[in-house]
Amino acid sequence: MNVQLTAPGTRFAATGRGEFVRALLRDRVTLSALAFVVFVVVAAVGAGVVSPHDPYAQSLLLRNEGPMTPADQGIAHILGTDALGRDQLSRLIYGSRISLTVGLASVLVSGVLGTLLGLLAGYYRGRADDVIMRVVDVQMGFPSLLLALVILYGAGSGFLNVVLVLAITRWTVYARVTRSLTLSLRETAFVDAARAIGCTNRRIIFVHVLPNLLSPLLVLATMEVATVILTEASLDFLGLGIQPPESSWGLMLAQGRQYITTAWWLVTFPGLAILLTTLSFNLLATWVRAVTDPVQRWRWLGVRQSSP
Amino acid sequence: MESRVNVCLSRRELLKRTALAGFAVVGAPVLAACQPAAPAPASAPTAAPQATSPAPAAPKPTTAPATAKAPAGKLVIALSVEPDTLENWKAYSTDGHPVLRNVQEALLNRDPVTNELVGELATSWEQVNPTTWRFKLRQGVKFHNGDPLDAEGAAFGLNYTWSPQNNFEIMAYIGPQLTAKAVDSSTLDVVTEQPDPILPSRLYFSPLPNPAQVKNDPKSLPVKPIGTGPYRFVEWAKGQYIRLTANPDWWGLAAPKDAHGEITIKDVDFIFRAESPVRTAMVKAGEVQFARFISPEEAKTTPQGVSAPSVETVFLRLDTMHTAMKDQRVRKAIALSIDKQGVADKLFGGAGRPASQLVGPSALGYNADLKPYPYDMEQAKKLVADAKAAGVQVDAAITCATRRGIYLRHDEFAEYTANQLRTVGLNAKSEVVDPAAFNKQYSMPQKDILPTRGWITNNPHGNEIMDVSSTAQSYYRCAGAASTYCNEQLDKALAAALPLTGDKRVTALRAVTKMFYDDYGAVPVIHMDLNFGLSKTFVWKARLDGFMLVKEMKLQ
C-alpha cells in the first residue's frame, strides 16, 4: 500500500504544475495517449461539425464500398461505407459520443456510489461493513456482463438503461478499494488527532479521509473508463445495448461482422477505435498512478524526491 | 472482538472450501470433455482410427473409386441450425429436412429437374372421389430395422403425423387434417373432410415414421429416426454432429429408375455453425464439402459457389388495422418507397429478383400479369401528403420489426425500410426482436392486434406446396394464421376457389392474387435465391424446394 499517511494538502507541495506538464511532454507514449483521448473527446463533442456526412443517410448504390470511395456529394468516404451505404467515418464519430458518454457517465455514477459505500463500510465497520461487503462479495462472484445482460433484458435497452446497468455492475470495485484504504486511514495519527479535537464523523470522513483516497480512486476511475467502454461495446455487440439506426462502436462491429471476409473496413475501424481509446485510457491511468505515487513520482517528474 | 475473529475465520474457511468445490465441479468435466471433443466430427475422416488427419473426405473418393459402384468417401455438410428434434413431422422445416429427408421417405417426392411430383414410396396415385385419394405402395420396401412397409403401417404413420391430438407443427403449416386407411396390403386411401385437390403436394412433405417405433419406443423418436431412406441414422452427438451412413438394403438400389438418385457417398456428417463466414471458411479450408445459406458474396469466394432460385419470397407484412396503414394510399406509398431492384441487386448481392406477389412462378395460381410495384419516391411522398390532407394520422408510429436471425440481412433490410418510410413522411423505426417475443406478436390473431401496434415485418415466405391456396389461406384471408389483412370479398373468392381443379383453379387463384395486389395487402419485395458453397469435387444441382438429398450428390 503506497498510501501517504500524512495530513492532506502537503502532497503536491513539492511539485508544481509545470513539472507535470514537462513530464508529460517528455513521455511520448502518454502524450500520444492523451492526444488521442483529447481527439476523441473533440470529435464526440463537435460531431455535428466535424463529421463529413450525415451518419444516417443511406444509399443502396454505395453499399460496402471501400475506403476513399468518392461520395455522391461532398468529401469522399474516407473510411468507406457500411452495408446500407452510410459513411463509416461519420458513424464512427457519432459512435464516439455514445461510447464516451456511457463511459464517463457510468464511471461517475458507479464511482460516487461505490466510494460512499466503501467509506461507510471502512470507517464505521460493524454491521454496515458486514452488510455492504457481503453484497460486494456476492456481486463480484457474479459475471458482470451476464448481470448486465439480465438487467437489460428485463428493463429494455436504451442509452440511460445502459449507463445505469454499467454503474450497478461496476460499483463494487470502488467500494472494495475505498474500504481497504479507509480501514488503514482511520487508524492514523491525524485521524486520531481530528477525533481528539472533537471533529464529527462526517467531517473526518470528508475532510481527512476522502482527500487521501482521491489519487488511487482517480487511477481506478481512469482504468474503469476503459473497462466500461469495452463492456458497453460488448453489450451493443450482443444486441442489448444501443439500438439501430443509432451508431455505436460495438453495434458497428456487430453489424460488420458478417462481412468480415468481404469488407474488412467494417470491423477494422470500429475495432481500432475501441482498441485505441481503451488503450489510451489505460496508459493515462498508469501515468497518473506513477506521478501521484510519492515513492515513484520523482523518476517521472525528474525532480529529486522531496523529503516529507 | 472474539466473535468477529471467529466470523472472519469461518468465512475464509468457507471461501476456501467453495473454491475447492468449484474447481472440482468446473474443472473435472472440462478436462474430461476436452479429450473426446478434440478429434471432433469435422476433421474425423472416413475411417475412425486415423482421427487426426486434417483434410478429411475430399481426396478420399478420388483415390478410391476401386470396386465398381460401392459407395465410398465421406461428405460433411455445414448447416446453420441444429434441429431440435428428428421426429418425422419436423421434415417440413428448413432445419429438419436436410437430415430427415435422407433417412425417411414420403409417399411422393418431386423430380429434381422438372419439379413435378413423382412417386417415392408410392408408385401411383389417383383421386377416386373429391375427398379421397388412393395410393399404390411400392413393394419390397424395408425400414432400417428390418420391418417391411405395408399399407397398414403407412396409414398408421400418416394418421400419427397428422393427428389433431398430437397437433404437431406440421399441421399449422400445411394442415388441414387428413385420415389414412389401408385398403389392402399395398393400397392406401387418404381422406380429407373437404375436397382437397392439392393433397399430394402436402403428402410430399410428410415422411413416414417406423410404426413399431412409434408404438413401442416413442421416447426414441426425437433422437433416433428410423426410416426407409437411402441413408441410415448412425448417431447424433448433440451440439456436434449428426452422422448417417449408406443403407445397403435401400429399395432404390433395385429400382434405379424410380430412385431419382443413387448412393455414391458412404458416410454423411451434418455439422452446425451459426455464422455464415465460419461455414464459408470451412468450405474454403476443405473441412466441409457443402455449406448452406451463405451470402452471395461469400459463395463467390468458395471453390464452387452455387446460387439457385428457391420458393422463398421476401415481403413486408403490413398491419392493415394500423391508424395510418388502414388507408390504402399509405400502403401504396410504402409499396412505392421500396427499391425492389436495388434491394435485389445491392442489399442481397444479386441473389434475387423483384417480386410482384408472395409466391414465385413455380406456384399454381401465380399471376404473371402482375408487375412488381414500381419504385417511385416522389409519388410515394405525394400519396402520404394526400392522406395527411384527408385527415389520416400519418405520423402514427410504425415499427419495421424483424425476427433476429430469420434470414440473411433481415436487419439491414428493416433499417433500410424504416429509412425509406421516414423519407416519404411516415414515422417509422426499425427493431430487431428476439424470436420468442417476435413469434408471439407475429402469430397473434388478427382481432387482437391493436391499431397502435403498426408493425411492418419483413419475412421470407416459402410456398413449398407450390399452390397459391396455402399462401392465401395463411396471409390473405381474415382468419389466416399469419394474416394481418381482411377483405370479405377476397375471403369469398378464395373459399370458392379451394375445391376447384385444373384451369378453373388457376383462374380463380389468379383472381384472388390480383385482389390482394390491387389493395396493397402486403408488399412483395424479392424472390430470394439461396446460396451454397461447395468443394471443387462436389457435384450437385440445387432443388427449388431446397431439399438436400445426398442421393442426388456426388463426390468426384
Image (cartoon, coloured by chain):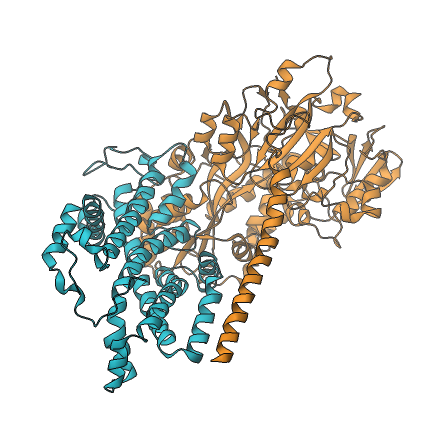
Please tell me the colour of chain B: orange
* Residue situated furthest front in the rendering: A307
Residue farthest toward the bottom in the current orientation of the protein = A198
Q: Is residue B104 above or below residue B521?
A: above
State the quadrant of the C terminus of chain B: top right
Image quadrant in which you'd find residue A78: top left
Q: Is residue B132 above or below residue B482?
A: above
Work out whether residue B431 or residue A48 is closer to the camera in this orientation and state it: A48
Horizontal and vertical percent position of residue B12: 52, 67
Residue B28 visible in the snapshot: yes
Q: Nearer the viewer, residue B297 or B366?
A: B297
Looking at this view, is A183 or A255 the one in front? A183
Which chain comes out cyan in the rendered image?
A
Write the residue at 75% across / 20% down. Answer: B256
Residue B462 occupies quadrant: top right
Q: Is residue A243 in view from this perspective?
A: no
Q: Could you tell me which residue is drawn at 50 percent across and 22 percent down?
A: B303
Side of A193 relative to B76 (left or right): left
Total numbered badges shown on the rendered structure: 0
Percent of width and height locating residue A134: 47, 71
Looking at the image, is B447 positioned above or below residue B501?
A: below
Q: Residue at x 41, y 49 (%)?
A: A237
Left or right: where does residue B218 sit relative to residue B53?
A: right
Judge left or right: residue A259 versus residue B478.
Answer: left
